Image (cartoon, helix red, strand yellow):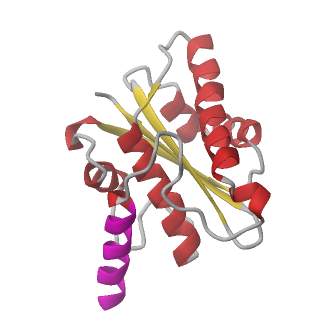
Amino acid sequence: MKRFVRRAAVIAALLAVPTPAGTPAFAAPSTPAKTAAGTTARFETEVVRLTNVQRTAKGCAALRIDDRLSRAARAHSADMVAARFFDHTGSDGSTFVAREAAAGYPRKGASAENIAWGYRTPAQVVSGWMKSPGHRANILNCGSVAVGVGVAYTGGGAPYWTQDFGRI
């Protein structure tokens, strides 16, 4: 129980860290080129762009980036790296709805979450999600209007990706 309380405190602290738009709140140690804030921000933005290409091709409106969803997504990716797990349930037992709400997004607006591990580029991760029926459904849900993406790296450089969606 103490372990979960400590992890919850760490996640809450990560969510509370104010970051400039597009700058990750946390990235695990890796090679400098892979975790440089500019590279990480470009990767996150490119995932949104590629997601919107898929959505608009199927008749959905493009998603807008929401900083609160981005904070939730970055914190979840960072948590997966730090606690060495891969799951939609956080190390503290949290759901994506709870993480989005903790980041300040309206609880009733939480829509969906996609996660991935090991894809090296934004194109690869979006392609992987589009090949998975559940992840594809999340991307093509026209009821979602906002998105946040977070990428964090392991010591070996294998990225963990989180994409959080909202409908408000």
The residue segment tinted magenta is 1-14
Residue 113 location (% of width, % of height): 46, 45
Q: Is residue 55 above or below residue 41?
A: above
Could you tell me which residue is drawn at 47 percent across and 39 percent down? 21
Magenta: main secondary structure equals helix
Q: Is residue 58 above or below residue 17?
A: above
Residue 99 lies left or right of residue 147; in this view the side is left
Nearer-the-camera pick, 35 or 92:
35
Q: Quadrant of the C terminus?
A: top left
Residue 42 visible to an observer of this rendering? yes
Name the image quarter holding residue 50.
top right
Residue 80 location (% of width, % of height): 53, 67
Could you tell me which residue is drawn at 58 percent across and 31 percent down? 48
6 in magenta: yes
Residue 96 location (% of width, % of height): 37, 52
Q: Is residue 23 above or below residue 126?
A: below
5 in magenta: yes
Residue 2 lies left or right of residue 121; in this view the side is left
Residue 25 lies left or right of residue 49; in this view the side is left
Nearer-the-camera pick, 74 or 130:
74
Could you tell me which residue is drawn at 22 percent across and 44 percent down? 107
Nearer-the-camera pick, 92 or 7:
7
Name the image quarter holding residue 158.
bottom right
Q: Quadrant of the N terminus?
A: bottom left
Name the image quarter holding residue 52.
top right
